[in-house]
Image (cartoon, rainbow, N blue to C red):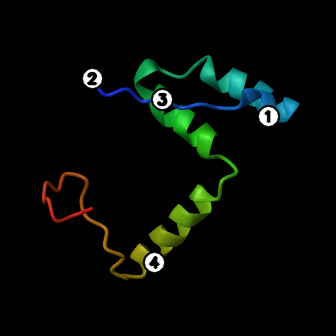
Amino acid sequence: MDTTLKTVIGRATMAADQAKEFDREIEHVPAAELPAVLVRWALAGTGADEEDDRLFERLALGENIGAVPADTHDSEVA
């Protein structure tokens, strides 16, 4: 069975201006970029961006946060 990515965005729970912005953006997103854009919208307001920013700041300072390259195929990682 093929893997399926499902992202549910509660558009009805968005403020009217946010919903308009979503509609404007989503109309022009290339198909290849659609999953990433939907995930960004689904995570908006969850604090995930701030958490990522803090991790990238720590990485920039040289701290080892346990990050590995995305192409690592080590079964011990994750």
Q: Residues within 10 Å of mark 3 (few under 14, many from 20)?
A: few
C-alpha span from label 2 to label 1: 31 Å
Quadrant of the image occupied by residue 61: bottom left
Image: 8 above or below 64: above
Q: Which residue is mark 3?
A: 6
Q: Residues within 10 Å of mark 1 (few under 14, many from 20)?
A: few
In the displayed structure image, the side of residue 76 where residue 11 appears, left or right = right
Mark carried by residue 13: 1
Q: Which residue is mark 2?
A: 2
**Which amino acid type is marked by label 3?**
Lys
C-alpha span from label 3 to label 1: 18 Å
Q: Residues within 10 Å of mark 4 (few under 14, many from 20)?
A: few
Which element carries disc 4, helix, strand or loop?
helix
Q: Which residue is mark 4?
A: 58
Q: Residue at x 86, y 30 (%)?
A: 16
Which element carries disc 1, helix, strand or loop?
helix
